[in-house]
Amino acid sequence: MEHQKPAVPPEHRRHIGMRIVKTVIAVFVCGVLAWARGQSGFYSMIAAVVCVQNTAGKTIESSINRMIGTLIGGVAGVLMVYAMDALGILYVELARYTLSALLLIPIIELCLWIKKPGCAAMACIVFLCVTVNHSVDDTPVIYSIERLFETLIGVALACGVDILLPYHTPAQTPAAPENAAPAAPENAAPDAPAPRGPEEVPADAPPVPEGEEPVPEDDAPEVPRADGGEQAP
């Protein structure tokens, strides 16, 4: 006899979310535009992947950080390349790698000083792209402008796709009221009473002196009746 697998609740089922769909669409459009221009869409695709977030507000914030980081890294990279070229050490690999690593410190500090810590990683990436990937045939300014332009394309497409395609908000389970009685344990007997909350004190009960505990009704002393018998508790 074959055993049937238990049904999986809807909240535990695997599904493709809208953020994944938006990322795929934005990256595809970046590739198509790069193919139409005869250029590489590598940087615009990276910008689209990084910028698309789970809400429209976060996408716009990520896009702004991406643009600020690209601008800071591009300017710093161009200045470093021209400075090393003037010193005659532009194509000395060990010197270029050493300076590229050390100059990451002021770049990160600048991002923190302008209260934009989210753009520090992108500023460092663009800076290293300009300085490390620089070749003899490349002009630093032109290379930086091309990287900035490609990043603009990726950012614009990420924001456009994120705004045009809506997000699907999952249904939320209503919260239980605060004064609801606690549920009985699963392994409790069928006739077992439900757990009781704190005992309520009657409004006409006499006040209890400080330092003494209230006497339960079952332990109260028996009061004699006038006819000589005992009053039932």
Image (spheres, rainbow, N blue to C red):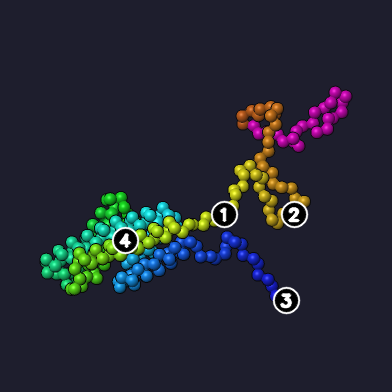
Q: Amino acid at mark 4?
A: Leu
Task: Place residue 220 in its image quadrant.
Answer: top right
Label 3 belongs to which residue?
1
Label 4 belongs to which residue?
152
Q: Nearer the viewer, mark 2 or mark 1?
A: 1
Residue at position x 14%, y 67% from top? 85
Mark with earlier residue (3, 2): 3
Q: CA distance from mark 1 to mark 3?
A: 38 Å
Label 1 belongs to which residue?
171
Q: Quadrant of the N terminus?
A: bottom right
Q: Which residues are magenta?
A: 212-233
Tell which of 19 and 37 is nearer to you. Answer: 37
Q: In this image, 27 relative to 199: left or right?
A: left
Q: Nearer the viewer, mark 4 or mark 2?
A: 4
Image coords of residue 96 (percent x, y) = 19, 68
**Mark 3 element type:** loop
Label 2 belongs to which residue?
189
**Mark 4 element type:** helix
